[in-house]
Amino acid sequence: MRMAELSRESGVPVATIKYYLREGLLHPGERTSPNQAHYNDTHVQRLRLVRALLDVGSLSVATAKEVLVALDSSEMSLHHVLGVTQYGLPLANTEQADEEAREWARATAERLLDERGWVYEEDSPAVDSLIGVLATMYTLGYADLASVLDRYADSAENIAEADVRYIAGLPSTESIVEGMVVGTLFGDALLVALRRLAQASVSATVFGSDGEGEEISPRGSA
């Protein structure tokens, strides 16, 4: 197919395709004349992935290039490729905390991760984000929320199992990377909505929508 057909097939404007070619995000087509090239389904697949990385994942062009280089390398495992991709995905911003708060948060995070036996890189942005969230909780006087951290980790582990098993069944390496990006970000949004709905349902049981909820004692009471 020619570039105009590639544009129609992929839904990506011609000008954007040319930009991706210049930036090295899309591999060149087979040259048929000085001003013409032929493209195929691999270009359509790559355009889907590039759009997922840039538009859905909000990765920078430089980070997207790193993902694609890792993807095209025969020396890098799929686990490594997914790690490079995950490093570029956005995480929650947290307030700056003092060293006391960060030391408590770091110790709490390391204890949780080590006890659960999770495999992770110490310089992972996700580890830093977890420490930042915990440090902010500590600074604002909500350190006791860490008492439910294990239950959060249980849920996260179950969701991660579902995520990875799902993308493992996709037909190609590119679709697996695309699925991880799209699934992670849309999954985050789904979790927020589902959590709100679940909280409303549990609240109705515990507190009673008609004032007839469970008998509970305030924390700290005898």
Image (cartoon, rainbow, N blue to C red):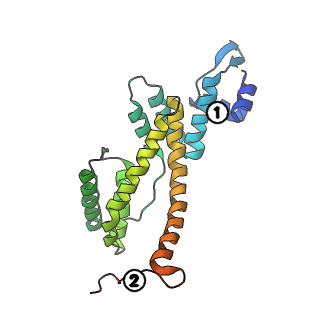
Q: Examine the rendering and report whether any part of residue 48 can be seen.
A: yes
- The circle on residue 155 is none
Would you place residue 189 above or below residue 86 in this image? below
Asked which secondary structure carries label 1, the reply is helix
Residue of label 2:
215
- Left or right placement of residue 6 versus residue 97 in this view: right
- The part of the image, by quadrant, that contains residue 82 is top left
Q: Amino acid at mark 2?
A: Glu
Residue 198 x, y percent position in the rendering:
50, 66
Q: Residue at x 45, y 77 (%)?
A: 206
Residue 76 x, y percent position in the rendering:
39, 28
Q: Residue at x 33, y 62 (%)?
A: 149
CA separation, marks 2 and 1? 63 Å
- Left or right placement of residue 91 versus residue 55 in this view: left
Looking at the rendered image, the quarter that the C terminus falls into is bottom left
Q: Residues within 10 Å of mark 2 (few under 14, many from 20)?
A: few
Residue 56 x, y percent position in the rendering:
58, 46
Residue of label 1:
19
Between 130 and 200, the residue placed more toward the observer is: 200
- The part of the image, by quadrant, that contains residue 142 is bottom left
Query: Which of the two discs, 2 and 1, labels the residue nearer the N terminus?
Result: 1
- Left or right placement of residue 205 versus residue 8 in this view: left
Q: Residue at x 27, y 56 (%)?
A: 112
